[in-house]
Amino acid sequence: MKHIESTLIASGIKRIAGVDEAGRGPCAGPLVVAAVILKDPFAPELSEVRDSKELSEALREKLFDVVIEQALSYLIIEISVEEIDSFGLHKSNLEGMRRAINSLEIVPEYVLTDGYAIEGLAIPNLAVWKGDQVAVSISAASILAKVYRDREMVRLDSRYPGYGLAKHKGYITAAHTKALGELGVTDIHRKSFANIAALINS
């Protein structure tokens, strides 16, 4: 497969940042955004990198370390439940992407994002449909964001036992819904989500 980076590199652009998020769908826990500039998107060490959703948990964990080793610069940030509830999921996601890009230690020459254009970004950028499937840099960012968030949800599981957070990672599963009915809503649940708002108002 020919990736987008090959065209950019051929035109003389070297520092390409990929940006992606993990955790838009769950009703609990933070949204996590990662930005990464790879030294060489086509390095052999990165040959297994693809959309994090297509990878097993074990392979994601392995590639998390590989991506960091192959990164010229990277940043992972959390967007809190409070921010999501105050500003909305989409706006919080875009702000998180801007924050991640602008906080990289090395300024990228070009930015590739998965699906959503980032308004107000001074650096040239391109929103790529299904970007984590056609851009190595976006796939690498998706792995960083997904693994980081999954680890955070496992940590939160010990603080909020009984909800099954380590297993479903905050998504709206039958087990999670049952636990919410029995144990109630916590401060890590997104009050702006319809299922949580319904529980609060019932």
Image (spheres, rainbow, N blue to C red):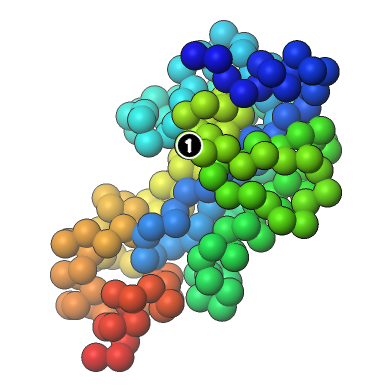
Residue 39 shows up from this direction: no
Whole-percent x and y of residue 125?
72, 41
Check disc 1 and report the residue beneath it. Answer: 130
- The image quarter containing residue 95 is bottom right
Q: Residue at x 68, y 52 (%)?
A: 118
Q: Residue at x 69, y 18 (%)?
A: 7
Badge 1: residue crowd in 10 Å (few <14, some 14–19, many ≥20): some
Q: Horizontal placement of 77 versus 53: left or right?
A: right
- The image quarter containing residue 80 is bottom right
Q: Residue at x 51, y 39 (%)?
A: 129
Q: Horizontal placement of 14 versus 81: left or right?
A: right
Element assignment for label 1: loop
Q: Relative to 196, say whether 151 is above or below.
A: above
Q: Quadrant of the C terminus?
A: bottom left
Residue flagged by tag 1: what amino acid is it? Lys
Q: Residue at x 38, y 57 (%)?
A: 25
Whole-percent x and y of residue 188?
43, 70
Q: Relative to 169, say whether 74 is above or below.
A: above
Q: Horizontal placement of 14 versus 82: left or right?
A: right
Whole-percent x and y of residue 13?
80, 23
Front-most of residues 41 and 150: 41
